[in-house]
Amino acid sequence: MSEEPRLTTRRTTHRRVPRLVVVALPLALAGLLSLLISGNALRPFERITVIESRMASKSDYFKDPEVKRLLLKHGIRVDIRRLGSRGIATRSLKGLDVVFPSGQPAAKLILDRPDDTGQSVRPFVSPLVLGSFRDYAETLVKAGVATPQRSTSGEPTLYYDLDMAKFMTLLDGVDDEGNPRDGEGSEADTWNGIGFKTVTGGNRSNSGSVLVRTSNVCESNSAGTYLSLLAFVANNAKTPGSSHPNEPRRAKEEVDRIAAKIKPLVSLQGMWADEQADSYFSALGESIASIAVIYEHQYLAHQIAHHEKHDEQDTNRVLLYPRPYALTEPQLISLSPRGDRLVELIREDEELRRRALELGFRIRFSGESGASEELDKYLQDHGIQQPVPNPDQTKALEPDLDILQDIINYVGECPPPNPDGSE
């Protein structure tokens, strides 16, 4: 009798996958996707060069995610330590690959030092402006010191031209001759006194003085540039010290007189160590300061982002363009071979230059004095009103560096430089 075949089954042992591995797999896939998007999937083991830097307000450019991505394509990552331009110029540069002061006075201080500087580039320019809010700008129009620019879109204008000579007579703490007042101030120099309550239809009131909030003049290029603008206007549209080029004593007397005249315009309004843009663009910006010293590119970048998010302009925040005007020229300065490589990229890479335009900068590669026609076209294409150049093209010329230093030190009572010391 034959046996029936026995059916046998093979016992299989299932090994449990550790939970850590299961969790890690999606993260690994996400990382791979990130590499694919950034263009680095084919070179995950390529060495990334870290650039040690110290930058002022123009660090906004290098903090932009798209700029970071473009630099990573070239194997570069920029490690940023934020500091005001004059702070950069007056402190130790040891261990740094590049510095990026926001204006020429600080850049010259750095280039004149014995530190081993290499290549440098001035990739774009940005006018100094005063950020404000519509009701305050319209109050200045009512007071006869500001003029609205024409809007081509039919919406309320975003830009106003500001007569600095007239505006300075409103600033608290000085009389019509620019001398400090002794006491309580003047009702005419309060916002309500020049018509704010009338402009708002009685719905809002501000009995505070007309003030401009600046960064600390001892550290900030924007504050130093604003200071030189005040000095130029206070000296009857002449650069302080220039009237007596061959008479040092008389030139020094002129500079001291102008410094004493404008100090109340700044020191009585409070100097803050930080840049003003973050406060100005915050939800509480209007309650922090009715007018703040900022750069044009910061405002334009805000408007571009606001339009992309809300499909409309931010018509409450407006710009006051000083007349005469002041233009800032940030300069990227190399301190090492690694820094040279970054300077070369910023100078030559078309994508990085294009991104600067998209962030509101006036790139130097087109248009006289960096007044880029491409920027106007970009704003128009993105639904943003373009600022109109004022027909009065008077530029507030900065004084010689040593004279500007004297004025800054007088107004800010600044500590001595510490170029070889620690932070």
Image: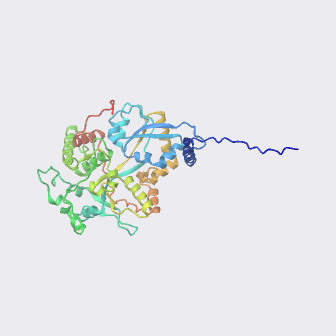
The residue sitting at 36% across, 44% down in the picture is: 103
Q: Is residue 356 left or right of residue 270?
A: right
Instruction: Report whether residue 123 is seen.
Output: no
Residue 79 at what x, y percent from top left?
44, 39
Instruction: Report whether residue 176 is seen.
Output: yes
Q: Is residue 389 above or below residue 333?
A: below
Looking at the rendered image, the quarter that the N terminus falls into is top right
Q: Quadrant of residue 299?
A: bottom left
Residue 218 at what x, y percent from top left?
28, 41
Pick the front one: 279 or 375: 279
Pick the front one: 151 or 422: 422
Count the marks: how many?
0
Pick the front one: 281 or 235: 281
Q: Quadrant of residue 74?
A: top right
Looking at the rendered image, the quarter that the C terminus falls into is top left
Q: Is residue 410 above or below residue 287?
A: above
Residue 289 at what x, y percent from top left?
27, 54
The residue sitting at 23% across, 48% down in the picture is: 270
Q: Is residue 389 left or right of residue 167?
A: right
Q: Is residue 181 left or right of residue 255?
A: left
Extreme right residue here?
1
